[in-house]
Image: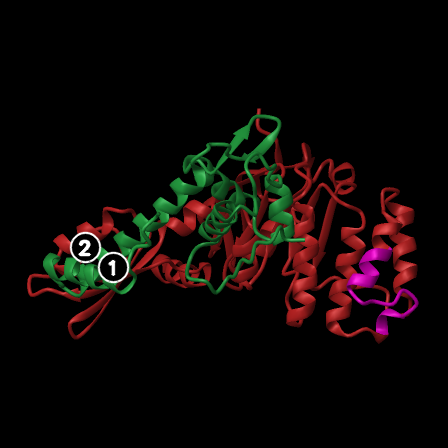
Chain colours: A red, B green
Amino acid sequence: MQQFAFEMRDISIRYPHFSMENLNLSLPKGQVMGLVGVNGAGKSTTIRMLMGLVKADAGEVKVLGYDLPAQQVQAKYDIGFASDDMRLYKSQTLQWHMDFIHSVFPQFDQAYAKELLKRFELIGDQKIKGLSHGQRVKACLLLVLARRPKLLVLDEPTTGLDPVARDEVISELADILRDDERSVLFSSHNTHDIEKLSDQIAFLDRGKLLALEDKESYLERWGRFRCQLQPNASETVAGAVSIKRNGQLAEVITDQCTAEYAVELQQAGFKVLEQHRMSLEEIFVANVKRSR
Amino acid sequence: MTFGLFLSATDKKPMYVQIVEQITSKVVLGDWPADMALPSIRELAASTQVSVITVKRAYTELELAGVIVTQAGRGSFVSTQPDLQQRLKHQQLMDHLSLAVDVARQLQVTDEQVLDLLQQQLNQQPELKQT
């Protein structure tokens, strides 16, 4: 039997200006899932339901085998959550926070926390109010990472970090990959980070799940072709997500890219000049434009 | 420690292909000798900061190509086939040739001209006769 880090089944939730219907999303244990979507797509709502902060109108949420929100107290011992709107106590030091978290979570690893202090270049005795935005983000992550949670949920973990700090954070996240008991769900606008670390990609737009697939197959499925239009070129090609024409040239984007697709294009009067893979960011934009 | 793999996100090739190519060249060059234990999938993923699924994919391709063998529960090892290096070099040659043909087709160079060009290249680097 496959074990899941979390399972969301037939979730519906309605707000005055936003709704989600029949969302099904689950993450096998030991995997990393990247949540992709524009602002307002439902990423934070999804995460909040997983954290038991919001109750869905209908459907079932299970995290690490516990029903949410009913058993959220038990579940939260093993969940680590960090988001960019999390607040620390301004007049206290980072060390005070570390001791505080340790008092709540006995598994808090002080030695690892010390190591992270060094790697993130933070100072334990410094008060939170004196920290820059980037330092606060890293401080929040330190407090979460040092608990070595079984499920790590990160809402925009690298937003507002400079490239060096982002690299430090990514390398700590990569370290989690060593352990096949630990799972990560993270949302980010930085598709590059998601493309690197994720096993699964979940694509949300306007409360709908546009795609949920393993990253390798997902990236492979998409392709961009630069073509020369033949006189007999047809208006459309099956499987094309977008066709842009300019003079004799055309750019075709497909999400059904296989070895045979170039042949199909050829037959439709699109002579293929070049074929490119697409980055997650390009797919993101093409996918959102298509679904609207 | 990245096990001597240099992966780049700006490379046009997908990550898993970069891993396949770099491990293959390590084996061809003999840096990774026959029977050497490869890092575990999770270990390599963590140290090169790419996802587990990407490394898994690379190892599957390497196994299909006969570069490595995977033993359930023990891990992956560099294949011990005696002619492995020779075979991989031969494969490289075939890949280059097929790429050359692709470009020739795009340029609409005739087959005869391709053969001529190849002959010219061969003449420029005469074969070393073994004595």
- A273 left or right of B81? left
Chain on which label 2 sits: A
Which of the 4 image quadrants contains residue A117? Answer: bottom right
Which of the 4 image quadrants contains residue A196? Answer: bottom right
Q: Position of residue A225 (x, y in %)?
A: 27, 61
- Tell which of B19 and B55 is nearer to you: B19
- Tell which of A17 and A99 is nearer to you: A99
State whether residue B40 appears in this view: yes
Residue type highlighted by circle 1: Leu
Residue type highlighted by circle 2: Leu
- Tell which of B127 and A12 is nearer to you: B127
Element at label 2: helix
Which residue is label 1 attached to? B122
Which residue is label 2 attached to? A265
Chain on which label 1 sits: B
Q: Where is residue A10 in the image (x, y as percent from the top left)?
A: 51, 38
